[in-house]
Image (cartoon, rainbow, N blue to C red):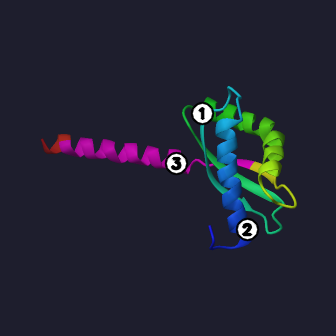
Amino acid sequence: MLGGSRKERVAELVKAELGRLILTKLKDPRLGFITVTNVSMSADLRHANVSYSVMNEPQTAEDTAQALESAKGFLQHELAGSLTLRLTPRLTFHRDESVEHSIQIEKIIKKLHAEDAEDKS
């Protein structure tokens, strides 16, 4: 954590702290199995774009998005108490579908390999 720009260091701190807060403090039943995958900060550190992934069904992803949106104020307040920043960044949540996309590609590849093995038999 010593290297990198201040913006990158703050982004990593926000990412780690949000992951901890979501896991330990949010009790919303709409939350699915969520992972904070990335945080990018604006140049002035006033805004944080938070990318997250959700495993499970599409409805769970929608419910999780609603739960995060309604918990945004709480999470910003908790960040203010745990990070030593002059201003607490405003959070914007974005669903990261790259993990799910990778899983789908892997399933297709496995299916193709299985079909190829059957054809050779």
The stretch of residues the image draws in magenta is 93-117
Secondary structure at badge 2 equals helix
Q: Nearer the viewer, residue 70 or 101?
A: 70
Tag count: 3
Label 1: state its secondary structure. Answer: helix
Q: Is residue 80 left or right of residue 54?
A: right
Can residue 95 be seen here?
A: no
The residue at which mark 2 appears reads as: 7
Report the front residue among 32 and 1: 1
The residue to which callout 1 is attached is: 58
Q: Amino acid at mark 3?
A: Val
Q: Compute the Cα span from label 3 to label 1.
A: 14 Å
* Magenta residues, dominant SS class: helix
- Dot 1 or dot 2: first in sequence order is 2
Q: Amino acid at mark 2?
A: Lys
Question: Disc 2 vs disc 3: which is toward the camera?
Answer: 2
Residue position marked by numbered label 3 in the rendering: 99
The reply to whether residue 24 is in sight is yes
